[in-house]
Amino acid sequence: MAGNIEDRDSLREPAAHTVDRASSSHFAKGRFGKARLANAQADDMHAAYVHARKPWTVDPNTKEVGKIAARQRSIRRRMLILRIVGIILGIGALCIAATPFILQWKTAANQSSQTQSVHNRVAGWPYPKAEEQLQAAQKYNKKLAASGQPILGEAVDPFASVAGSSSVSGHQHTESAASKDAEYQSLLDTGDGVMGAIVIPKISVNLPIYHGTDDAALSRGAGHLYGTSLPVGGKNTHAVITGHRGLVAAAMFTRLDEMKKGDFFYIDVMGKELGYEVDRISVIDPSDVSSLRVEPGQDRVTLMTCTPYGVNTHRLLVSGHRVSIPNPAPHPSDVYDLHTIGICTVLAILVFGSILAGVWKRWHRFIVMHHAGKNRPAW
């Protein structure tokens, strides 16, 4: 038994020695490991100190990227400046191109307002003042037709402007025959020399008609050609209404060449509305007045302007005979200027399309950037 116990003790001894050696080895490793860690930290601190003492250097690749970024910023700035300059120039060109149209629109609005003012003034006259004016004009027309019309127009051609232009002639100081005729000036006088209005819905014309065709009259509206019938209708009458074309600040009769046979125009005089259907279009020499005389039995009005456009060597005549309203001539408010409506429609489509394209471009860019941000890897 005692031997067995000793044997067991002898067996335990190696294990104890093993534990002691392991503990000693672990202790040594821990001590030396800490020393190595301390040395490594010291080396890192020394390297950092040395690096801090050295001049700062940049990786060549980083320098190249910086140069590219700076170049791109410079290009973007230049493109932005060019874009701003382009927008300013575009707006300036648009304003210059639109100036005549704006001036013409403003003048047309003023002239239309004036004709409406004259209409309202006559409507406010006590009865029978307007009727008496019409009767006096009809009596004048009868006397004129019986006289054979010895005088037709003025001594100075109202369209005899400087060659190549459609401006007013420049004879402001020449006294016209119409201005010398006191009886003529007193007839159909609604105030300020206006006798009525010429309305051509197809070409958006609504002009006051003045006595005579001097520069003062034609610069403000249409003029009645002295020596022709007053525009009050009736048999054996032929009134001639003249107007400029090609003026920068006023359209006047600029679009008269768009009139076709079968089109209608109207005369508003002393509260009466007279309708005329175009049945004759011709071009004459300035000295040819045979087409302007009274035609027996006819109730006719002729619109006259210069032609060709900007040259003014001939006269364009658009003549119509009297018809009843509303059939066959529709009421003026029922006739539309399809040309102007078409232009306005196209411009509206272009503006709306440009806005829509800009919005779509920005929205598309936003969607692309939004999806790019979502799909970016999280590093």
Image (spheres, helix red, strand yellow):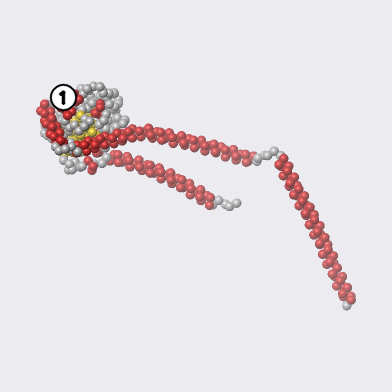
Residue found at the far right of this picture: 2
From this view, report whether residue 195 is shown above or below residue 173. Answer: below
Q: Is residue 72 left or right of residue 204?
A: right
Residue at (89%, 75%) from the top-left corner? 3
| Residue 307 position in % (x across, y down) | 25, 29
| Residue 133 position in % (x across, y down) | 15, 33
Q: Secondary structure at mark 1?
A: loop
Residue at (22%, 35%) from the top-left corner? 118
Q: Which residue is mark 1?
A: 151
Residue at (21%, 25%) from the top-left corner? 286
**Given the image, on which type of amino acid does mark 1 rest?**
Ile
**Frontmost residue, 162 versus 139:** 139
**Frontmost residue, 336 versus 284:** 336
Q: Is residue 273 left or right of residue 245?
A: left
| Residue 370 visible somewhere in the drawing | yes
From this view, report whether residue 269 is shown above or below residue 161. Answer: below
For residue 290, which quarter of the picture? top left
| Residue 221 position in % (x across, y down) | 25, 31
Q: Is residue 267 left or right of residue 110?
A: left
| Residue 280 visible somewhere in the drawing | no
From this view, report whether residue 68 is shown above or below residue 2. Answer: above
Query: Where's the N terminus, which quadrant?
Result: bottom right
| Residue 284 position in % (x across, y down) | 21, 27
Label 1 CA crowd tier, 10 Å (few <14, some 14–19, many 20+): few
